Amino acid sequence: MSMSDGSGDGLNPARGRVLVVDDDPDVCALLQVRLTGRGFEVLWTTSPEAALKDMESVDVDVVVTDVKMAELDGLELCKRVADRRPDIPVIVMTAFGSIETAIAAIRRGAYDFITKPIVVDPLVVALERALEHRALRAEVKRLQEVVEEHGRFGELVGRSVAMRRLYDLLDRVAASDATTLVTGESGTGKELVARELHRRSARAEKPFVAINCGAIPAALLESELFGHAAGAFTDARRARPGLFLEASGGTLFLDEIAELPVTLQAKLLRVLQERTIRPVGADREITVDLRVIAATNDDPDAAAQAGRLRKDLYFRLNVIRVEVPPLRARATDVLLLAQFFVRRVAARAGKAVNGLSVTAASGLLAYDWPGNVRELQNCIEHAVALAETDRIELRDLPESIRESASRQTAPASADDPPLATLEEIERQHILHVLERVGGQRKAAARILGLDRKTLYRKLAGYGIRTSSSD
């Protein structure tokens, strides 16, 4: 093999395998020593052509390459790696720094740009970010394949520990006719759970009827639920069966049960106990055969203690309790859910959007989702509508998500140095802004809120030349 490595030093690195390409063997050897000491496995070669050949059989996680090399220009190497192995990020290093070189490297597919002489801490920061980028890219691709296999639990999507526990419970209680109480924060998917219980039950071929008890005026709710006889009240010209009878043989889902007026709670309790209803204005009771599933985003124990929910009704509803976890408790499902929504929303909108960029995925992971799955779905609908390519980019996401992504900082353990200094974060941001404005220093200075002299001084400190004509 034409690449040299440090495998003989007895270390067992776990941070990633780095390939260094530089026609100066002393630079390669120095980087190998320094990066190996930071826990990386380092391979190196002085031949760009050999690096390309060996990458076909040896897997590496990140490539670090010089620009000025006699055999093959580093920018051309960057382009070839991007064409052949787009999953491998490339970090370009050069002592001949200029904005034009940085922009050219990024346009050739480089992930980052480091200037010589190399300072190990910024390089380690860049490598860690590149490794995170590669891992996230692989995860996004994997989840696209996972979504294709989706279907066992209908609209419920997730592979987290919390969701696997929920699936196990649903498997065990779906066949029961026992009254069930589904609890969870707003937007977690309580109705989806109720529908899945119905779908997996012996009543699946019968109706599933849902009503939000807090969305209908109290004066109309009794008639809506129990029905009414003809002439029971003004405008009741004919009898109406009500939702209990409409759900006969199937399932009635009572969402926001704690919002049900207390007077109707007593009547609901009687239905659950006697399995009969009396329509408004009727003189006889009617037997009903159905399963009742109730849900609330309130704490049912607190609601019962406060008198908003009758305790006897609460005990009758709480025969089986299903708690739906909030999205923050199943963070590993965020990208899987996002990919699921991308496919569904894009298909409905007739847009050729089929996935997420790495930056968009990172933004979704940085957000805490107070609105849970419903907020994530709305976010993806927003992004699909704005998407200009076949992938959702960070710029397509709502402002709240973009702001969260900009505030994100990677945590460091007490034993490790910080992943990035303020100086390094500033450098990365300045280079990013310059890249976005095509190297126009005046525009960059205006966006950054710096005068041009200050910007030029900082660029000189990064090893990037400026001229009087800039």
Image (cartoon, rainbow, N blue to C red):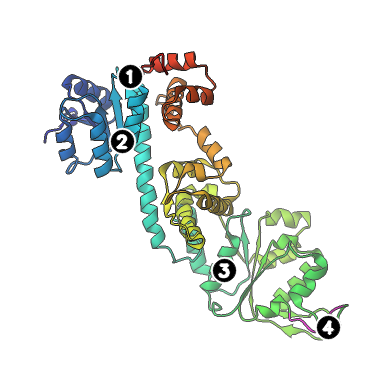
In the rendering, at what x and y percent does residue 350 appear?
A: 48, 61
Determine the secondary structure under disc 4: loop
Task: Say which element carries label 1.
Answer: loop
**C-alpha separation, residue under disc 4 versus residue under disc 1:** 85 Å
Q: Magenta segment range?
A: 235-241
Q: What whole-number distance in Å separates the C-alpha atoms at marks 2 and 4?
A: 75 Å
- How far, Cα to Cα, is label 4 from label 3? 34 Å
Question: Is residue 202 rendered to the left or right of residue 286?
Answer: left
Q: Is residue 238 magenta?
A: yes
Q: 10 Å neighbourhood of mark 1: few (<14), some, or many (≥20)?
A: few
Image quadrant where one finds the C terminus: top left
User: At 15% across and 34% down in the image, what residue appears?
Assistant: 49
Name the residue type under label 1.
Val
Look at discs 4 and 3 and give the one toward the viewer: 4
Q: Residue 195 bears which disc, if any?
A: 3
Q: Are marks 3 and 1 in contact (CB under 8 Å)?
A: no
Kindly identify which residue carries mark 1.
119
In the rendered image, which residue does mark 4 sit on?
237
Q: Residue furthest right?
A: 234
- Residue 305 is situated, as x and y percent measured from the top left of the image, at 75, 55
SS category of the residue bearing label 2: loop
Which of 310 and 164 lies nearest the eye of the viewer?
A: 164
